[in-house]
Amino acid sequence: LQLVGVQNTGLIQSTKRSRARVEFHRKRHKLKQNHQAVQCNSNQHDKIILNRKQQANQNQRHGKPGTKIGNRHKKAPDFVLAANDLSPRGLKDYAGKVLVLVSVPSLDTPVCDMEVRRFNTEAAGLSDKVRIVAVSCDLPFAQARWCGAAGVKAVETLSDYKDTSFGKNYGVLIKELRLLARAIFVVAPDGSLAYSQLVPEVTKEPDYDAALAAVKKLV
């Protein structure tokens, strides 16, 4: 009986070891599969990022949509923006003028700050028939504060904070962040869209020379 008990105990221990080995190999196989899946997803993600970068570079080279001369027969979309005193502004307020719409994410960021300051400086060499407007979703009060601190007087700041009509109508609204993409639009005196540039990378500045050349052709 004692021998049988020892044999049974040995059999139980052997069975436990076998089950443990099976469970170990099962978990190891599952872990390997998960690792392969993660690696596959990582490779797919890398490919997507690479494709996006390549597409952005290609867009910049070919001007689609990096820099695009708009159809002069296409009317610029209207909008309702808020001035620093909360009064509404629309295209009709700039009728007969060459209107430069500078779309930026936020004036309180370094690139936007540099960009609007640059246009403020360039405005000195432009005709009085030109109006430059910086548009963002910053509150009108914040825009007024920034202009005062930066000494910007030649560029008007308008806010799209209320219903983002500008962002929606011009296709530059970043919905997830409720911010505007970086872009330049030049509206001719007849209300047609003469020039546009959508900057593919929001941390990059626009093509100032191309935008200013388009403005000078209209005055």
Image (cartoon, helix red, strand yellow):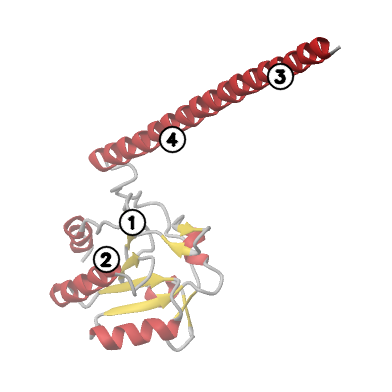
Viewer-nearest of discs 1 and 4: 4
Q: Are marks 3 and 1 in contact (CB under 8 Å)?
A: no
* Residue farthest along the right direction in this orientation: 1
**Above or below 137: residue 216:** above
In the rendering, at what x and y percent does residue 151 appear?
23, 86
The tag on residue 111 is 2
Disc 4/disc 3 C-alpha distance (Å)? 47 Å
Crowd rating for badge 3 (residues with CA inside 10 Å; few <14, some 14–19, many 20+): few
Please tell me which residue is depicted at 47% across the width and 72% down the height of the picture: 160
Look at the numbered discs 4 and 3 and tell me whether their residues touch, using CB distance below 8 Å: no
Please give the name of the residue rendered at 19% of the width and 62% of the height, measured from the top-left corner.
212
* SS class, disc 4: helix
- For disc 1, the marked residue is 202
Residue named by callout 4 = 45
Tell me which label, 4 or 3, sits earlier in the chain.
3
Residue labelled with disc 3 = 13
Q: Is residue 74 above or below residue 37?
A: below
Mark 1: amino acid: Val
Viewer-side label of 2, 3: 3
